[in-house]
Amino acid sequence: MDSQTTPTGEPLLSVRNLSTTFSTETGLVQAVRNVSWELYPGEILGVVGESGSGKSVTMASIMGVVPKPAGKVSGDSVMFEGRDLLKLPPREMRKIRGREITMIFQDPMTAFNPVKTIGHQIAEAIRVHDRRVSRKAARARSIELLASVGVPSPEARYSQFPHEYSGGMRQRAMIAMAIANGPKLIIADEPTTALDVTIQAQVLDVLKLIQAETGAATILITHDLGLISEMSDRVLVMYAGKVVESSDVFSVFGNPQHPYTLGLLASLPRIDTRLDSLLSIPGQPPSLTSPPPGCAFHPRCELSRGRSECWTAEPPLVQIAGPTDHTTACHFFTEMDTEAGRVSAMLGVDVRSKAES
Amino acid sequence: MLRYLIRRLMIAIPVLFGILFMSFMFTRLLPGDPLLMMMSVEEFSATDEYMEQRRSDLGLDKPVPVQYVVWVGEVFQGNLGTSFHRRAPVTELIWDRLGPTALLTGTGILLALIIGIPIGVMAAVRQNSWFDYFSATGSMLAISIPNFFLGLMAIFIFSLQLRWLPTGGLRTLGMEPSLGDSLKHLIMPAGVLSAVLIGPYVRYTRQSMLDVLRQDHITTATAKGVRGRSIVIFHGLRNALIPLTTVIAIQIPALLAGTVIIETIFSWPGMGQLVLEAIRRRDYPIIIGVVLFSAVLVMIFNLIADLLAAILDPRIRL
C-alpha cells in the first residue's frame, strides 16, 4: 500500500445520487439508493457489503448493463472524464464499454460464450472497438495478452474453447480481455469468489501486476475483507443499497465508524488468536422492496437499542473531523470507539487492525 | 470429432438390428399364409405338391431363424419384397414416393424456419412486448387450427375463389414439366405444412433464446461493447440453435414418413398417400417396408442431430 491516503486532483469517476430500481412481481426493489462517491485515477477502490447490498448493481448501472426494462437507473450524474454516462446516447456508451471501462466478472465458468474460442472472444473485444485492426493483428495481440496474464502456451490456448480452460486460467483470460484496449477503469466484480483459494492468490497477483503496469483505476467488488485490506487504497462499505462508510483502507479497518463495518470486522476469523466463537451480525439483510425506515441497519444494530432516532430519521453520510477523508452514515458514530472497545473485549482481541497490516 | 462419429455409429448398429428384428416379427405375425396372398387367381386350383414346391422355392419351409437371416440379407440388398396389390418391388415404390415427399416437407420446414426463427428471436429480445404477445397468440392459433381445415380453406380461397393456384397434384398433367408450374403446385401444400410447424418453431426459438440471453456471457459481450444486434445473433442465436437443431432433426423423419393429411388433401403423390393406400388394401409388404424405412430414417436423423449438435457445441466433442 504505497499510494497516498487522501487522493487529490480530479476524480476519474464521480457518481452523484445514483439510484437503481427493479420492478418485480413482489414490488419495486430498490437495489441502489441514492449513492454518491468518487474514484481517482490509478487508485484501487474496494467495495464491500453483503450479498444484495447493491455493490454489483451500482457497477452495472455505471456500465449501463442493468437488465431492461425491469431495471431503472436514475440519478444526477455519473461523470467519467467529463462525460455524463447516464445521459450518453447508447452508441457513445458502447464505445466506452470494453474500451475505457471494462469488467471482470465473478464466475469465469459462465462469463465466456461456450461455443466460441477464448481467443476469438478476446479478439472480438479488440475488433469491436477498432475495425481497422485486421483479424491477424487482433489474433497476435490476443496471444500477447494471454501471455501477459500468465496463460502458458498462449498460441495453442488461443484456439481453445472455455471448457478446455481451468477456472483460474479462465479468469486470467478474462483479465486479458479486460485490459485488451488499455482501459482507464477496470471493474472487478468478485473476481476470485468462484476460485479455489490457491488459485485465488495467483489470480490476485496477476490482477495486481496488471494494475501496476497499466495504472488503470480499479474498482474491486468483494465481500472478502482480507482481499480489500490487501489490495485497495480506499474502501466503500455498502449496506442495503447505500454507502454507509467510506475512507482509506487504514481508517476503515483501524477505526471503523459504522456499526455495520465493525460487525463485518468482528465476524472475520483470525489467525493471530484463538477464538471460542465468531461474532455474527444478528438478523438478515433487509428486504430491498421495503427497506426499514430511518437507518436501514437499525434492526441489527447494537447502538440503536432503544433509540427512536435510528428508525425515524435516515442518517446522512457525514464527514468525520480528522486528517483523512472519512465519511459515515450513523447517528451515533461518536460512540463507535467505545463500541469497538466493547466488541473487542467480548472477543478478547482487538478487531481493529493496526495501521501497518 | 471422428471418434465421436464412430462411437455414435457403433451405437446405431444394435439399434438397426433391433429395428430389423421387429420388422421381421411383424411379417411373421401377419394373419394368413403369405403364399396364398401372393398367388394369382389362376393358381388357386393348384395341387398340394405344387404348393409345397412353391413354398420351398420361397424358402418358407425353412426354420424361422434361417428365414430371418435370409430376409436380413435381402433387406441389405435393398429388397423389401413385392407389393401384393401393385406387383412391384416395395423399394421401388417407396423410392418413387420419397422425392415428392422430401420436396414437400423440405420446403415446408425451410419456410417454417425462415419465418419462425426470426419471429422467435424477436419475441425473446422484446419479451413481454406487444410483438411477443402477438406472436404467442399467432403461434397458438396456428397450432390449434387442424391442417386439413387450413388446407381446405387454402384450396377454397386460392384455387376456387381467386383461381391463382391449382388444387393439387405434383404438376399439371399433359404439360411440359417446368419450374414455374412445379412451384405453383408446391406453394400451397408446403405453405399449409409450414403453418403447422411455425408455431412450435417460434416457441422453441423464443424459449431457447430467453435461456441464452439470461446467461452471464451475454453480459460479458455487452460489457465488451459489442453491438446489440451482434450480441443477439452471434452470441445469442448461435447458442440457442443448439437445442433447436436437435428438435428439428428429430422431427424430419416423422414428416418424411408421410404428411398423410396434407398429401391427401392436395393429391400429392408422396409417402403418406402410399401408406394410406397400402393400409386400405392390406398391402402388408408396403406397410412393413415403410415402417422399416421410417425407423431407419429416425435412426439416421438422430445421428445427424447428434452430429449437428457436436458441430454447434464444442463441449460435446469431448
Image (tube, coloured by chain):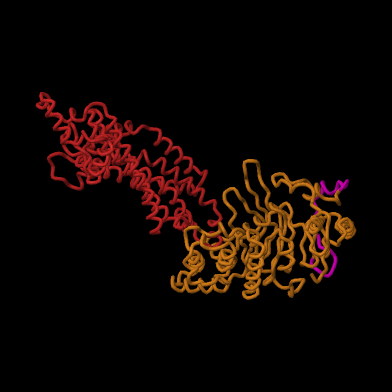
Chain colours: A orange, B red
What's the residue at 86%, 62% (across, down)?
A350
**Rendered-image quadrant of the N terminus of chain B:** bottom left
B190 in relation to A250, above or below: above
Identity of the residue furthest to the top in this view:
B45
Front residue of B122/A46: it is: A46
The majority secondary structure of the magenta stretch comes to loop
Q: Answer with left or right where residue A168 lies relative to residue A32.
A: left
Front residue of B69/A173: it is: B69
In the figure, residue B292 lies in which quadrant? top left
What's the residue at 44%, 70% (across, down)?
A135
Instruction: Say if residue B197 shows up in the picture.
Output: yes
Q: Where does the magenta region start and end?
A: A305-325
In the figure, residue A331 lies in which quadrant? bottom right
Magenta span contains residue A216? no
Magenta span contains residue A320? yes
Front residue of A115/B216: it is: A115
Rendering coords of residue B231 (x, y %): 49, 57
Rendering coords of residue B147 (x, y %): 34, 34
